[in-house]
């Protein structure tokens, strides 16, 4: 834990209040990401859409989201992460609400209804693109250096909250009031979140009236001198072994993580033969494990950096948890008892979240000035791996069986740990 600066009063804790605001914002992104997964069956039935059309509709968000990661991070670096995040929330909340009327804003039905839905979801993805890079930049600016990983863990906490609690809540809302009301409500909540974020946050700690001198000194301790404004250092980026290793590791980590996002429920129902309702409940276990693993991983990563420094402080938790995830995926896929298998696979997801926490801390470790752009680039790699996962996983399972498909995922996690041996957070690109 960051300590008080000698000679100054007890630091205030406004930085943690800002983290709570960011947790609210990031959780909203997952609420608005998962709501279409629940609404799809209602929309498919009402408009007689095919499975292929629904699949394309679900992929529209991912496409817009992946394409706008790096540009969104660059906008945060250029114009201020707080400002860009405010406009991003307004953007995706507006189009979330417009999802409810997408079939009706086609005068003369000149546009197929599936295309109208696709465009709205693509625009929601574009709006959410800047969210995580700008959030990560705000954490790097506001959190003390020894607290960065704990601040970054909020991304994964938001995944856990979204995956564990949003689908049942959205399903209940849609059952009682219809899918259109649910999207309108999510849009309205987003507008309220944008206003609250704008009024309660500042771009820099020094601008916030609640931050006292002791907290400001704590935040600014151990930082490198600010660099001059200028173009992104692409040459140093492409020459950095750390960035190359991180990009490939994030791709592989995204591949494995998206198995739990997209296929875990069907795996439990179709392969492990759980009843549908039981499968829906048990499919939340990976997200509950993420809720535990993410903050624990942030605490451990920060503690290791304080104790042994870079690079091993960030590296060791990732290497150990990636190896554990590999073993749990391989062993869990072979367990005959379905509930034992679920437990092991859920813990593997928790281990993945520990690795992801350190991955999110790295952009701020490597560059404070360009952290938003760098986070966007690395998260693009994560989502490219995530885009491959829903396609390749069922192919491997159909051709070689689910044991082989999960073995392949376990092999990816082993590679994640090995790649982190080439990551050097102390070799900054500034």
Image: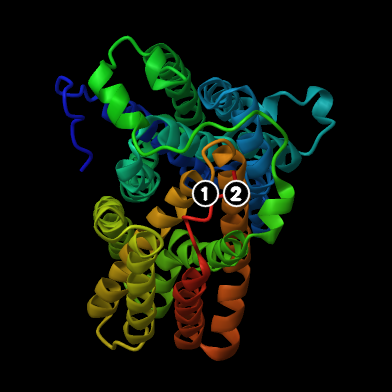
The answer, for residue 283, to whether it is visible in the render is no
Task: Using the rendered view, name the quadrant where residue 268 is placed.
Answer: bottom left
259 vs 154, nearest the viewer: 154
Query: Who's the residue at 47% across and 72% down the image?
Result: 421
Q: From the viewer's perspective, is residue 394 above or below residue 402?
A: above
Query: Badge 2 local density, few (<14 within 10 Å), some, or many (20+)?
Result: many
**Relative side of 314 to 257, left or right:** left
Element on which disc 1 rests: helix
218 vs 182, nearest the viewer: 218
Question: Can you say which quadrant of the picture contains the C terminus?
Answer: top right
Task: Using the rendered view, name the quadrant where residue 318 is placed.
Answer: bottom left
Q: Residue 43, image x and y in percent?
A: 58, 42
Query: Who's the residue at 61% across and 78% down the image?
Result: 395
Q: Earlier in the sequence, mark 2 or mark 1?
A: 1
Q: From the viewer's perspective, is residue 134 above or below residue 235?
A: above
Q: Are marks 2 and 1 in contact (CB under 8 Å)?
A: yes
Which residue is label 2 attached to? Answer: 429
Query: How many badges with numbers are in the image?
Result: 2
Question: Can you say which quadrant of the picture contains the N terminus?
Answer: top left
**Relative side of 290 to 426, left or right:** left
Which residue is label 1 attached to? Answer: 366
Q: Residue 420, image x and y in percent?
A: 47, 69
405 vs 274, nearest the viewer: 405
Element on which disc 2 rests: loop
Task: Using the rendered view, name the quadrant where residue 21 is placed.
Answer: top left
Q: Residue 199, image x and y in percent?
A: 41, 11
Q: Residue 18, image x and y in percent?
A: 34, 26
Query: Badge 1 local density, few (<14 within 10 Å), some, or many (20+)?
Result: many
Query: Who's the residue at 24% across and 58% down the image?
Result: 307
Which mark, by number, is residue 173? none
């Amino acid at each position: 834990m960051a300590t008080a600066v000698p000679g100054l009063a007890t630091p205030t804790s406004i930085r943690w209040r800002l983290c709570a605001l960011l947790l609210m914002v990031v959780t909203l992104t997952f609420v608005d990401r998962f709501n279409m997964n629940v609404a799809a069956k209602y929309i498919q039935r009402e408009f007689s859409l095919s499975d292929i059309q629904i699949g394309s509709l679900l992929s529209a968000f991912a496409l817009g989201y992946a394409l706008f990661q790096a540009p969104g991070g660059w906008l945060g670096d250029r114009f201020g992460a707080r400002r860009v995040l405010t406009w991003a929330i307004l953007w995706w909340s507006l189009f979330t609400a417009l999802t409810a009327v997408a079939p009706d804003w086609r005068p003369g039905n000149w546009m197929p209804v599936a295309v109208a839905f696709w465009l709205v979801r693509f625009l929601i993805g574009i709006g959410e693109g800047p969210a995580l890079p700008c959030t990560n930049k705000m954490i790097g600016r506001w959190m003390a250096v020894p607290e960065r990983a704990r601040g970054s863990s909020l991304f994964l906490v938001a995944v856990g909250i979204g995956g564990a609690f949003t689908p049942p809540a959205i399903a209940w809302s849609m059952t009682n009031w219809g899918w259109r009301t649910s999207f309108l409500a999510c849009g309205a909540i987003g507008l309220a979140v944008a206003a609250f974020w704008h009024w309660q946050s500042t771009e820099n700690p020094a601008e916030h009236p609640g931050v006292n001198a002791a907290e400001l000194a704590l935040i600014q301790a151990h930082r490198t001198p600010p660099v001059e404004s200028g173009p992104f250092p692409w040459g140093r980026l492409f020459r950095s072994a750390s960035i190359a290793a991180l990009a490939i590791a994030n791709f592989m980590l995204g591949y494995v993580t998206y198995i739990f996002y997209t296929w875990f429920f069907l795996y439990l129902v179709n392969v492990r033969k759980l009843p549908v309702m039981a499968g829906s409940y048990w499919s939340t276990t990976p997200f509950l494990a993420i809720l535990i693993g993410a903050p624990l991983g942030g605490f451990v990563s920060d503690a290791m950096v304080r104790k042994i420094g870079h690079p091993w402080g960030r590296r060791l938790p990732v290497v150990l948890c990636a190896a554990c995830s590999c073993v749990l995926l391989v062993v869990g896929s072979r367990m005959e008892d379905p509930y034992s298998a679920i437990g092991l696979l859920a813990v593997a997801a928790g281990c993945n979240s520990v690795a992801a926490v350190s991955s999110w801390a790295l952009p701020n470790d490597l560059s404070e000035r360009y952290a938003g752009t760098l986070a966007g680039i690395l998260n693009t790699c994560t989502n490219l791996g995530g885009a491959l996962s829903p396609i390749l996983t069922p192919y491997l399972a159909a051709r070689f069986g689910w044991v082989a498909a999960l073995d392949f995922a376990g092999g990816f996690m082993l590679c994640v740990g090995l790649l982190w041996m080439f990551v050097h957070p102390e070799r900054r690109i500034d």
